[in-house]
């Protein structure tokens, strides 16, 4: 964003002014979130997506609380781990198609937190102000018993993908009156079809783009660590049109909630989660979220708080801007976030800016001769523990 508007008349100050603003400003996260949620008041059943990503800073030893973060790599033998800071995002997915995802909270995952705990905390914060019960979408990393228990008291339905090597259990049989009551029933291994029993519901459909889809559903299953929270298991399989064999890897979904959508709708509902992946790409490539070389975690968080604000401004102006594009891209009936960002400059010039022109105050005197320079403190990379949910330390040195 600095590079995009650095030479424009709308951004008349120097780079240093932007960094000073990030050091001095204090964005009101709660008020901004409530302002975003006001735009969702008419939505009958909002769909939320929760995920996390990494802001890599491998060459910043003076940045406090850097951790080891997962980073996908295109190299065949590359290590999918980088050094930086993780950020958790909860976003509203406003439409059934397209790449729009509107973040409600975009916060740093501290060295004593993990993505599952942070996602559960963000979901509770958002649901406190929502008028209608939402549906929260999670990726396979969140499909675990600790998240189920952490979100059990939150007024939200949950749809999550789970890994194909997980093992679930059915409800136990009725108590016989002797010994300790059983907690688990039959074992259901996702990667072992011999342990499956007849599903409660089976459905096949022919989709225009994906072809033949087979859906199966099993009720009243649970994780080993959360036996008091029953779930509905859904298997989505894409089959060959002629042979009926699996065309791709199966998709396992778990539903935890009150009123589940129909079997034909629920697997397509999960696909809306990928709009959040498009927003991460927008934030990093178009909004230049990871470009500034900020020196403290607080400055990084303040800069990150502006990313949802900018995205909501793009969403609210998508019907007001006139599309601006290069000759080779085709025109779009529904503008994407990136296309709206390309078309924003004439709109911003039209509304102007309320700030006055900066006044030159002369050149700085510079560093005083003979004044000692102190090196900034170097911090080691924090290696998190194995536990999913960790407690915050009393003090961070």
Image (cartoon, rainbow, N blue to C red):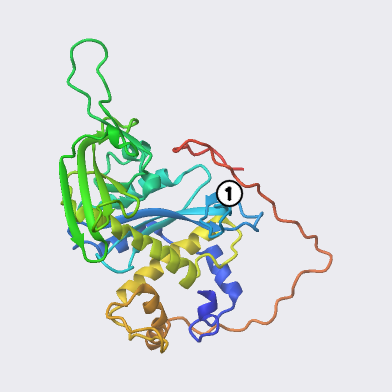
Reading the image, the residue beneath label 1 is: 65
Residue 163 image point, x, y percent = 37, 44
User: Residue lying farthest top?
Assistant: 178
Residue 194 image point, x, y percent = 28, 33
145 vs 360, left or right, is left
Q: Is residue 348 above or below residue 278?
A: below
* Nearer-the-camera pick, 290 or 331: 331
* Nearer-the-camera pick, 313 or 76: 76
Residue at 65%, 58% in the rendered image:
59
292 vs 276, left or right, is right
Residue 362 image point, x, y percent = 67, 82
Residue at 18%, 63% in the rendered image:
42
How many marks can you see?
Answer: 1
User: Residue lying farthest right?
Assistant: 370
Rate crowding at label 1 as few (under 14), some (14 to 19) or many (20 or more) other CA atoms within 10 Å.
Answer: many
Q: Is residue 124 among the parts visible in the rendering?
A: yes
Q: Is residue 237 above or below residue 317?
A: above
Name which quarter of the figure residue 269 lies in: bottom left
Q: Is residue 375 above or below residue 199?
A: below
284 vs 193, left or right, is right
Q: Is residue 130 among the parts visible in the rendering?
A: no
Residue at 56%, 56% in the rendered image:
76
Residue 169 image point, x, y percent = 28, 31
> For the residue labelled by badge 1, is the local secondary structure a helix, a strand or a loop?
loop
Residue at 57%, 68% in the rendered image:
19
């Amino acid at each position: 964003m600095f590079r995009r508007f650095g030479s424009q008349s709308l951004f008349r100050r120097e780079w240093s002014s932007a960094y000073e603003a990030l050091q001095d400003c204090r964005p009101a996260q709660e008020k901004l979130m409530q302002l975003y949620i006001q735009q969702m008041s008419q939505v009958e059943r909002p769909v939320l997506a929760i995920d996390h990503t990494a802001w890599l800073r491998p060459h910043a030893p003076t940045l406090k609380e850097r951790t080891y973060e997962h980073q996908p790599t295109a190299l065949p033998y590359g290590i999918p781990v980088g050094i930086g800071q993780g950020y958790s995002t909860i976003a509203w997915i406003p439409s059934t198609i397209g790449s729009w995802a509107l973040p409600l909270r975009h916060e740093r995952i501290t060295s004593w937190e993990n993505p599952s705990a942070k996602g559960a905390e963000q979901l509770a914060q958002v649901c406190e102000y929502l008028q209608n019960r939402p549906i929260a979408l999670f990726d396979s990393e969140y499909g675990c018993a600790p998240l189920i228990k952490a979100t059990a008291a939150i007024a939200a339905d949950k749809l999550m993908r789970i890994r194909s090597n997980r093992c679930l259990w059915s409800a136990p049989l009725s108590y016989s009156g002797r010994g300790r009551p059983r907690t688990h029933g039959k074992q259901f291994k996702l990667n072992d079809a011999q342990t499956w029993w007849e599903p409660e519901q089976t459905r096949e459909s022919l989709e225009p783009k994906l072809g033949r889809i087979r859906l199966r559903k099993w009720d009243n299953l649970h994780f080993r660590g959360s036996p008091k929270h029953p779930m509905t298991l859904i298997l989505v399989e894409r089959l060959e049109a002629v042979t009926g064999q699996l065309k791709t890897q199966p998709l396992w979904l778990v539903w935890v909630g009150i009123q589940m959508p129909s079997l034909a709708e629920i697997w397509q509902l999960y696909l809306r989660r990928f709009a959040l992946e498009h927003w991460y790409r927008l934030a990093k490539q178009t909004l230049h979220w990871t470009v500034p070389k900020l020196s403290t975690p607080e400055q990084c968080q303040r800069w990150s708080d502006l990313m949802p604000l900018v995205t909501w401004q793009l969403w609210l102006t998508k019907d007001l801007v006139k599309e601006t594009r290069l000759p080779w891209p085709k025109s779009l009936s529904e503008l994407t976030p990136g296309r709206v960002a390309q078309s924003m400059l004439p709109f911003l010039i039209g509304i102007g800016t309320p700030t006055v022109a900066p006044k030159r105050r002369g050149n700085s005197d510079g560093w005083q001769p003979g004044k000692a320079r102190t090196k900034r403190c170097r911090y080691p990379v924090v290696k998190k523990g194995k536990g999913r949910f960790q407690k915050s330390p009393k003090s961070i040195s």
